[in-house]
Image (tube, rainbow, N blue to C red):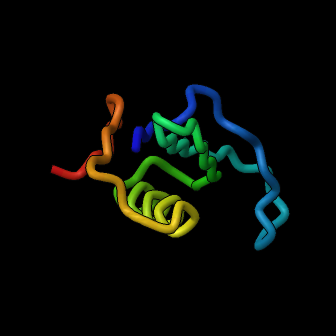
């Protein structure tokens, strides 16, 4: 599974306070099938990255042999 954050951010309305906020777009792709998962997250923090990966794996219904990041700043050591 290849993972990365999209280069452009999206703007969303925060339901808690009604303010516009920028969000990151997490993208996961299974390379053989091109099955793609996208999720808006508040930041590129480790917590948001791990949660988005978990959500992608739940959608895919399994775990790939490898998770390959592409220059992600928050990648775990």
Q: Residue at x 57, y 36 (%)?
A: 34
Q: Where residue 49 appears, x then y in whole percent? A: 42, 55
Q: Where residue 39 appears, x then y in whole percent? A: 62, 52
Given residues 48 and 58, the one toward you in this image is 58
Q: Is residue 70 left or right of residue 11?
A: left
Task: Report the quarter where the N terminus lies.
Answer: top left
Q: Is residue 20 left or right of residue 4?
A: right
Q: Residue at x 46, y 35 (%)?
A: 31
Q: Residue at x 52, y 59 (%)?
A: 56
Taking the view exactly as shown, the residue that stands out farthest to the left is 77
Given residues 15 and 7, the one toward you in this image is 7
What count of labels does the image hold? 0
Taking the view exactly as shown, the residue that stands out farthest to the front is 32
Taking the view exactly as shown, the residue that stands out farthest to the bottom is 16
Residue 24 lies in what quarter of the image? top right
Q: Where residue 8 appears, x then y in whole percent? A: 63, 28
Q: Residue at x 44, y 58 (%)?
A: 53
Determine whether 50 is above or below 32 in the image: below
Q: Where residue 10 appears, x then y in whole percent? A: 72, 39
Q: Is residue 67 left or right of residue 60?
A: left
């Amino acid at each position: 599974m290849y993972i990365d954050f999209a280069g452009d951010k999206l703007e969303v309305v925060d339901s808690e306070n009604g303010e516009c906020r920028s969000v990151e777009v997490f993208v996961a792709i299974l390379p053989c099938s091109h099955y793609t998962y996208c999720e808006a997250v508040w930041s590129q923090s480790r917590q948001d990255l791990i949660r988005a990966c978990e959500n992608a794996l739940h959608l895919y219904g399994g775990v790939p042999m490898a998770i390959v990041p592409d220059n992600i700043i928050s990648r775990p050591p």
